[in-house]
Image (cartoon, grey):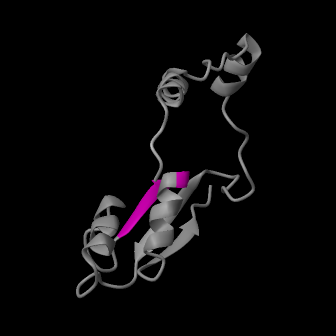
Amino acid sequence: MPKKKAGEAAEAAGAAEKKAPARKRSAAAKKGAKEKPATTGAQTAASGRLRVKQVRSGIGHAATYRQTLRALGLKYHQDEVVLRDHPAVRGMLRKVRNFVSVHPVEG
């Protein structure tokens, strides 16, 4: 690899020191960011609650599955809990979809 000349080395060092200007947001953009997003059709419209029942044991499966079942509040086989319909809960349910049955809460 050829050596850099003294002028080229100074230019390279100067280019590395330059920073991109900070992005400024308008007041309208800040206000829009604070607003809550509209609910989607994937969420249950009536109550926003889900009844989750563990139908398969976590014994003999990976620890991450058992920990996810515990985080959902399911302590043993055939246990049932009612949870708020939330994207984080939906993600956990998707991970353990072979272990649980999910139904919307009526009323």
Which residue: 45% across, 83% down?
A: 98
Q: Which residues are magenta?
A: 80-87
Residue 84 lies in the magenta stretch: yes
Percent of width and height locating residue 29: 73, 20
- 78 within the magenta span: no
> In the image shown, does 89 or 19 lie closer to the viewer?
19
Position of residue 90 measured from the top left corner of the image (x, y, whole percent): 53, 61
Name above or below for residue 1 compared with residue 27.
below
Residue 42 placed where, x, y %? 69, 59
Q: Nearer the viewer, residue 67 or 55?
A: 67
The residue drawn where x is 55% and y is 53% is 87
Q: Quadrant of residue 62?
A: bottom left
* Image position of 38 with respect to 76: above or below: above
In this view, the residue farthest toward the top is 27
> Quarter holding the C terminus?
bottom right
Residue 37 pos. (x, y %): 69, 37
Between 7 and 12, the residue placed more toward the observer is 7
Front-most of 2 and 63?
A: 2
Measuring 49% from the left and 65% from the top, which residue is drawn there?
51
Q: Does residue 70 appear left or right of residue 49 in this picture? A: left
Q: Is residue 12 above or below residue 48?
A: above
